[in-house]
Every structure is written in structure tokens, then in C-alpha cells.
Image: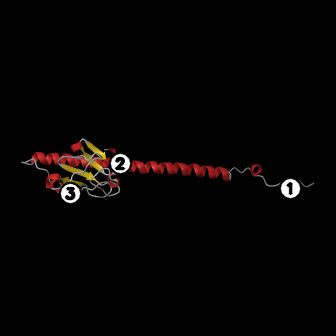
Amino acid sequence: MTRPIRPFSRRQAGFRGFTIIELMTVVVVMGILVTMGYARSKYTIEQGKLAKAIGDIRAIQVDIAGYQVASPSQALPATLTDIDRAGLMDPWGRPYIFVNFKLGGSPRTDVFGVNLNVEYDVYSMGPDGSSALSLTAGTSQDDVVLGMDGGFIGRAARY
């Protein structure tokens, strides 16, 4: 007597595996996790660049104060070269801007038109690489600025 032929069954054959739905679910979940991780790492990198720019501007400010103390007339440096900071680049690959108002530079202003600093200005043009004299200008919003004669160092949008 012959047995009837049954259709092939994976369970009867001892196979274990995943269905296409299970595999698709895993791929979707992993894609979501990778997307969230990428966005967070991009934000963290930008925050690190901002922190570096703030630290560099603070160091330039300290060097300028040291230069003034060492100078007989307490004069400001004419350029960053005078304090050995000529080659210092911001985290976005551009040089820091130093403006000595006594040598004819124009001061930057805040939202009320008040000058940010009295004697000099130091800033980075930020990620977009462009800037304007007023912090309210769209191109200045991402700049990292020195304000209140050193009382504030940070993004222009937060000033």
C-alpha cells in the first residue's frame, strides 16, 4: 500500500527560518535606528565645532589682554599675527576675524543697534561662511561672536 503524497511542509522537514514579514520588520526597525543615530551624530558634531570656536575666541581674548598688559601704551594688536594667532582657523576652515576699532574697523551691532564691543571684535563667520555688521541679518545668525567685551561668547542667534 502506498502512502498518499502530501505537500512539502517546512515544519515537518525541521526547517527553521524567518518569514518575509519578519525580515522586512527587522530591516525597517534597523533603518529607523540608523536614521536617528545619524541625525544625533550630526547634531553632536556641530555642537563640538561650536564649542571649539567658543574656546578659540576665548583664547584669542586672553591673548589680546596679555598683549595689552605687555604693551607700554596698552595698545591693541593690529592683527592676529601680533599675538601669534595668524594661522588659527575656525572649525569650518576659515580664519577668525579680528577688527580693531581704533584702526578704522566698524563695530557689529545687536538687535537694538548697540555695539557688541567697545575696543575690538573677534568672531567666526560660522558654517555658512558669510556675515554682516548687524547680528539681525540672516547671514550673521550662525556666527560665533564675542559680545559685551567678553561677557558673552556664543552663537549670534542667542545674543
Instruction: Tell me the residue at 26%/57% (across/down).
Output: 95
User: Disc number at residue 86?
Assistant: 3
**Which label's residue is closer to the chain start, 3 or 1?**
1
- Screen quadrant of the C terminus: top left
Q: What residue type is labelled 1?
A: Ile
Query: Which residue bears the numbered disc 2?
Result: 48
Q: Which of 133 and 11 is in front in this view?
A: 133
- Screen quadrant of the N terminus: bottom right
Q: Nearer the viewer, residue 124 or 10?
A: 124
Label 3 or label 1, whichever lies nearer to me, is 3
Q: Which amino acid does label 2 sit on?
A: Gly
Mark count: 3
Instruction: Tell me the residue at 26%/47% (across/down).
Output: 113
Q: What element carries label 2?
A: helix
Q: Which of 110 and 86 is in front in this view?
A: 110
Residue 141: give x, y in percent of width and height.
34, 51
Q: Distance between the residues labelled 3 and 1?
A: 86 Å
Q: What element carries label 3?
A: loop
User: Disc number at residue 5?
Assistant: 1
Q: Which colour scheme is used?
A: secondary structure
Q: Do the residues labelled 2 and 1 touch (CB within 8 Å)?
A: no
Q: Is residue 12 left or right of residue 109?
A: right
Q: Which amino acid does label 3 sit on?
A: Ala
Q: In this view, does 17 lie to the left or right of 113?
A: right
Instruction: Tell me the residue at 24%/41% (across/down).
Output: 151
Residue 55: give x, y in percent of width and height.
27, 47
